[in-house]
Amino acid sequence: MKTDLTLPMPAHALIPHRPPMQLVQRLLSYGDQAGVVEAQFAADCILVAPDGVLDQVALVELLAQGYAVIKGYDDLLQGKEISKGYLVGLKKIRLTGRARAGETLLVRIRTVGSFEGFAVAEGEVERAGEAIASGTLKLWIVGDAPAGGGV
């Protein structure tokens, strides 16, 4: 059975995360190992405070899940099974704004390099066109390392 790769595409088809830890909803666009992923948080989300403000740690997780979504989509485009991966490093993380429950956030993420099972991605989280978080992620992609290679 062939998977429908029409965008936008539900994120749950591309990542292992499930509620309440699935923070992204849809892949909106993709091209050249980069994409835009949409996220919204309900007021009852475990990462939203009683005053309706999203915990800033969720912004970093949005970057990681955004990468997982574009990697999963890229795998499907190549006819492969969706890879599993793990966040192993962060660099130049900037948290410059806040988000509230109900706001639509866009995660813009792009792969900037990959080598022997590791990938580096850069991204930003936007609210109403303003970057509220950005940074570089290092990820270990299970199965992407050369056979017999070790780290």
Image (cartoon, rainbow, N blue to C red):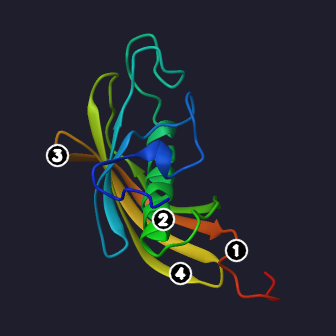
Kindly report which numbered mark, 2 or 3, lies closer to the viewer in this rendering: 2
- The quarter in which the C terminus is drawn is bottom right
**Position in image of residue 23 (x %, y %):** 47, 37
Residue position marked by numbered label 2 in the rendering:
71
Instruction: Between label 2 and label 4, give the one nearer the viewer.
Output: 2
Which of the marked residues, 4 or 1, is nearer the chain's N terminus?
4
Spatial separation of the CA atoms under disc 3 and disc 1 = 36 Å
Q: Amino acid at mark 1?
A: Gly
Amino acid type, label 3: Gly
Q: Determine the residue located farthest toward the top in the rendered image.
A: 50
Picture quadrant of residue 84: bottom right
Q: In front: 89, or 62?
A: 62
The disc placed on residue 114 is: 4
Q: Circle 2 sits in a helix, a strand or a loop, which is it? A: helix
Tell whether 1 sits left or right of 144: left
Q: Quadrant of residue 6?
A: bottom left
**Residue 81 coordinates in the image, percent (x, y):** 59, 66
Distance from Cα at disc 2 to Cα at disc 3: 24 Å
Q: Are marks 2 and 4 in contact (CB under 8 Å)?
A: no
Q: Nearer the viewer, residue 1 or 19?
A: 1
Find disc 1 in the rendering and name its residue.
143
